Amino acid sequence: MIAAEAKPLSQEIVDEIIARHPDKTGDVLSVLEEIQDRHPLKYLPEATYDDVAQKMGVSRSQVLSVITFYSFFNLKPQGRHTVTVCRGTACHTRGSKPLLDGLKAKAGFHEDDEEGGSATSFTTPDFGLTIRTVACFGQCALAPVAAIDHEIYGHVSDIKLRKLVAAIDGGKGS
Ligand code: FES
């Protein structure tokens, strides 16, 4: 099931996106952004960015440097929903680490898992949920802060976070 879903975007869609960007070198960022956005799992498979490099006449390393420079690009499949927990100083002192640990444990990640150790992004095997961290949302007065997809929530407690996660995707997000 995982392999079936985590596949490159169809060739037709990739070609159609590239064809709409005549400035091959200058439009690499826009093309990659659109391709990721169109992928159901919001990421850039290796075969896809290799294809982009070849068709846009830039080197693979140039494409990779764009992808790794911008934090919004994903090299791994993402969940349908994303929970982002702030790990900045203000949020840390107000308990963001236990919030994150509780969330990871509920989603089935453990510190000794490959994904549960030092990684900063975790996605459930069914691609329902991605848990990630951020350095600061710029909302430190509301610490601890977390976001569900693009909605930011302040003064988040463990119970509040569990309720928010349970409510997304009709309760299927966790
Ligand atoms: S440290 Fe968390 S919002 Fe700034």
Image (spheres, grey):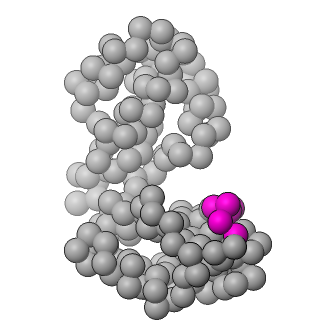
- The relative height of residue 86 versus residue 61 in the rendered view (above or below) is below
Q: Is residue 174 above or below residue 17?
A: below
Number of numbered tags placed on the structure image: 0
Residue located at (48% from left, 11% from top): 24
Check the picture and name the quadrant holding the N terminus. Answer: bottom left
- Residue 35 visible somewhere in the drawing: yes
Image coordinates of residue 139 in percent, x first then y, are 65, 66
Q: Residue furthest bottom?
A: 159
**In the image, what residue occupies the spot 50% across and 79% down?**
104
**To which quarter of the image does residue 126 belong?**
bottom left
Highlighted magenta segment, given as a residue range: 135-140
Is 171 on the left-hand or right-hand side of 112? Answer: left
Which x, y percent locates residue 83?
46, 68
Q: Nearer the viewer, residue 94 or 75?
A: 94
Is the residue 172 above or below the residue 134 in the image?
below
Q: Quadrant of residue 123?
A: bottom left
Identified at 32% across, 67% down, the residue is 128
Q: Is residue 105 visible?
A: no
Is the magenta region chiefly helix, strand or loop?
Answer: loop
Point out residue 35 in the picture as x, y percentages from the top left corner.
Answer: 37, 33
Compare residues 52 and 88 and report the one nearer the observer: 88
Left or right of 88? Residue 9 is: left
From what the image shows, is residue 153 above or below residue 66?
A: below
